[in-house]
Structure formats: C-alpha cells, structure tokens
Image: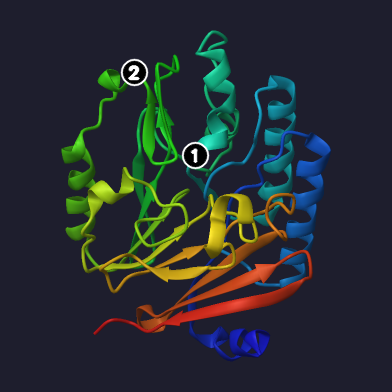
Amino acid sequence: MIATALKSLESQVLHRVWVFSDLQQSIPSEARRCLTAAVDDFRSLALPVEQIWYLGDAVEGARLDHLEEMAAMQVAMLTPLGAPVRYVLGNHDFDFLTRDKGASGRTAVFRDAVLNTPGWRTTDSIESFFYFDRIGDFTLCFLSDHADPQGRWISTHGTVHGDQRLYPHNADAYTAVRDRIAAANGPVITCSHYAFAGGNRPSGLHNLMLPLPKNVRLHLYGHAHIGDAAWAGKDLYRKIAAVDDHPIIQCDIASLEDGRGSAIRSAILEIYRGHSLGLYFRNHSTRRWEESLLLDARR
C-alpha cells in the first residue's frame, strides 16, 4: 500500500530527500555490510533524491585507521548517488577526540571527510551547534553535537561533558537560533541527532529552544535505534511522536545498523506541491516499507 501511495503522489513531488543516521560501526567490514544493504535497496526503489541528510554517528570507536577507512568507504558509496550530503555530528563521532584530546590535531574523522567532499556540508566549525540550509521553499535548521578541538568540553547526549566553564554557548545562544527559525520566510524542518522533549532519548540542550516557533513543520532525528530495548526502553519501536506541548511531529529515523537496532533502516522525505510532506520509513533488511506519515500543509 505504501508503494502504491508513493506512486500515486509522484506527480506532486517537488523535492525528495533520503534521511538516515547511525551507521555507527567500529569494524570496517560491518560498516560496509550495513551501508551496502541500505544503498543497494535504496537504488532498487528508483526514487531520485535531491539531498541526503545524515543525522550523526557515521562511525564509532577510537582506532584512527579504522575510522579513516570507514569514512572513505562511505564517501565512495554515497557520492555516486549524485545527491549532496548534509551532515550533523552525533555522540560517537567524538569517540576519538574523547581519547585523543586533540593531541593528533584530529577531532571528528567523518566530519573531515564531509568537509573534503565537494558539495557536502556540515557545521562551519567543530565548536558550532547548528547551521541553516534550504530546500525549495523550506528553511532547514541542522542541530549538531560539537566540541572543543582539544576535547576540554564535548557536547553529546544533550549535555556538556568536561569543563563546562569553557562551554561558549549559553541559553541565549539556543533561543537566538529559535528566533532565527521564527524569522524564516516560510516553513521550517529541523534535523538533529537528537529528539526534542517527547521524542526518544531527547536532548536537554535542544529543549533550551522550546517553545518552538509555529513555522516548524517537522523534526527528524536519530540516536535511538529502532528496536534497541537497552537504550530506547519502552519506546523502542516508536517512530512518530509529538514534541511535548506542541502540535509539531518529530520522527526517529535510526538506524543504518542491525546490531543494536533490529534492522537496517532509513526514511524517504517527500515535499509536495503546496508544502505538504510525506515521510516513508524503509526497512532495508527486509526491503519493505514499514510505516508512512502524511502531513498536510498548514493554511
């Protein structure tokens, strides 16, 4: 039925995006296996996309040669798809910096790969927690994990670890981003490694931005691997929820791995004429659609 719905709406599509997160492997062969399954299934759908949104945890672990191998593999597999990647960092992107403390001059290995790939984008600096972009009439706000280059403080899991006195972003910095969202011309989609309150494994720092402006149409996040009871608890299979006290939907699209998660998963986002949205949850392990969400335009 979901495939039928996608086909019936094809003439209304203005923009299409592939959204995923949490490949999160420390062993290169496992990273390659999981990403190959996702890319092969994605190609079989014959749904060309304008952008790819990668919501963190591209790698895991602190072994530099493995991290560099996995980063290069992902660039090699994703580049031929012809869609630029928009990346935000997740907690495992800082596994290396947590141990290395800047001694090697390296911070987040996959972030380096993104910056070195033409057309791909992430935060302008390792200390920054956001950037803005656009797709059609929609403003995009990407919220990222971030850190001091020497690892004196690192922001992951929605909090600041290390020397919090050195953290450069106070509550006003987060509300300033919210104010920029509110001032955007037209609808907004926010994307992050983490949920807002009401979602799976929400971020306390993100919640400094609440209440969200009314022009936010959708929030997409990863981090909570679908099917992972150890970390997602009772909500391990919940993909769709509201932001607490808001008429705003947020969706968990994790994960690209099937060790902690119960399958290799991602989502396809379609933006239709008139600003309606369709989000389609894909299980690459079974090569089947699992769920879908349609959001009509706000009048």
Q: Secondary structure at mark 2?
A: loop
Determine which residue is flagged by label 2. 163
In front: label 2 or label 1: 2
Q: Is residue 144 left or right of residue 287?
A: left
Q: Nearer the viewer, residue 269 or 287?
A: 287
Q: Is residue 119 left or right of residue 27?
A: left
Tag 2: amino acid = Asp
Q: Residues within 10 Å of mark 1 (few under 14, many from 20)?
A: many
Mark 2 and mark 1: Cα distance apart in space = 20 Å
Residue 27 appears in view? yes
Estimate the x, y position of residue 191 in percent, counting from the top left: 42, 55
Q: Which mark is residue 292?
A: none
Q: Residue at x 39, y 41 (%)?
A: 158
Pointer 1: what residue?
A: 89
Left or right: residue 45 versus residue 114 is: right
Q: For the view shown, which residue lies furthest in the top direction?
A: 103
